[in-house]
Image (cartoon, rainbow, N blue to C red):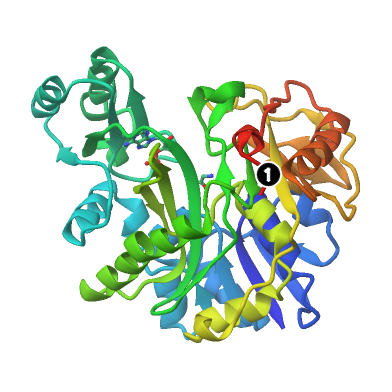
Amino acid sequence: MKILVVGSGGREHALAWKLAQSERIQTVYVAPGNGGTACDNRLKNVPITDLNALAEFVQKEHVGLTVVGPEVPLAAGIVDLFREQGLKIFGPTREAAQLESSKDFAKAFMQRHGIPTAAYQTFSDAALAHAYIEAQGAPIVIKADGLAAGKGVVVAMNLQEAHDAVESMLAGNLLGDAGARIVIEEFLAGEEASFIVMVDGKNILPLATSQDHKRLLDNDQGPNTGGMGAYSPAPIITPELHARVIREIIQPTVQGMARDGIVFTGFLYAGLMIDAKGNPKTLEFNCRMGDPETQPIMARLKTDFVSVLEHAISGQLDSIELEWDRRTALGVVMAAQGYPDAPVKGAHITGIPAETADCIVFHAGTHSDHGTFSVSGGRVLCAVGLGDNIKVAQKHAYEAVDAIKFDGAQARRDIGWRALKKPVR
Ligand code: AMP
Ligand code: GLY
């Protein structure tokens, strides 16, 4: 069987890497892919991003199954388009993807269905937004309504920052249509975790737990990014909290969507904030897997992922169980100089170690020229280490990071610090 992974990041490299391990797979296509997927002889890059052209490619090549990595093609309706043509694809429809593509949709949905989340209001009028901020006080959080590639959220610690955010999003139109409406919400304190499940319309299959590091710099300082590192499992998600998140957040979301007339299929990723007492609230929904969470999660998955996707597409997620490597996997992102604001492309990359039983380097923003790699995007690589505990996993990941060289490389040195602080399980 042939399979198609849509996207070009580290998440897609990890998905394709895992799918290629299945004995039933002839070719894994990655569209458009990156330098790493180009160099793996079990994978084949396809230089197509137009959705109609992708559907045509799938018809022509008899691709049996498509899985979508990023949010943009989902929000553009790739699942609807493929299904109309009778093509098998795993992901949410355009309507369902609004849980991610519109913060206002997601907040109204959560409020309507009693799903725990921060209190909020939506604005398109700047004067009303400023007045609301004055009435609420700081800290307070300002979010662009639409997709903004991780740049649409300002956690304002004082009133000035909050007013400035409103000005640039609403008045300054800095984010274009994505910021034409904004959500202003209550600041939540606590620890974040990524809670990712697969949904087949009815059944829910949780993936291994994970946590990522959103800030650019050590000690969670600096600007927000797409994620500078992640690990799995996340010790903060105890079995009790896991059961609670399923009961209070995930099930009501899937059922609430159905009640609103929208069948949810695809990965559902709830970004959680867990307060000091251990109570979870939903910060956001994504309708896809996380990047870089996917890299450590796929590194730990033992079950044949092709079979998992087939069960998901045929509505049978209740009849499959996932088996996980008991080790911890920890991924450290290496980013380009100038990331996240203005990544510098073109640097020559050397020293990427070959895959071993306890380390895999997934590519993201890389370009390959006959096996010579250069930087082509913001997040460049993600080195995943595996080990019997977080400390060993971290050591293996940083051994790879230390071997890899490119001009201006940025990597945090403290990925996993929260889990390291927790008592050993
Ligand atoms: P989002 O895209 O909504 O997940 O927001 C990006 C990041 O902003 C989150 O990962 C949090 O670190 C932070 N954030 C978002 N909403 C809140 C909130 N209500 N309180 C505190 N931090 C938040
Ligand atoms: N790592 C965060 C995200 O994928 O949205």
Residue under pointer 1: 424
Residue 390, position in %: x, y?
73, 43
Residue 110, position in %: x, y?
24, 56
Instruction: Name the quarter showing ligand 1.
Output: top left
Which residue occupies 37% across, 45% down? 147
Which residue occupies 31% across, 41% down? 178
| Quarter of the image where one finds residue 244 | bottom left
| Quarter of the image where one finds residue 142 | top left
Residues 420 and 314: in front is 420
| Amino acid identity at mark 1 | Val
Q: Quadrant of the N terminus?
A: bottom right
Residues 159 and 409: in front is 159
Residue 95, position in %: x, y?
30, 66
Which residue occupies 76% across, 55% down? 327
User: What is the residue that sits farthest to the top in this orientation?
Assistant: 160
Question: How many numbered discs, if any?
Answer: 1
- Residue 91 vs 319, above or below: the answer is above
Give neighbour class at mark 1: few <14, some 14-19, many 20+ (Cα, 10 Å): few
423 vs 316, left or right, is right
Residue 262, position in %: x, y?
28, 73
Q: Is residue 87 visible from the viewing direction of this image?
A: no
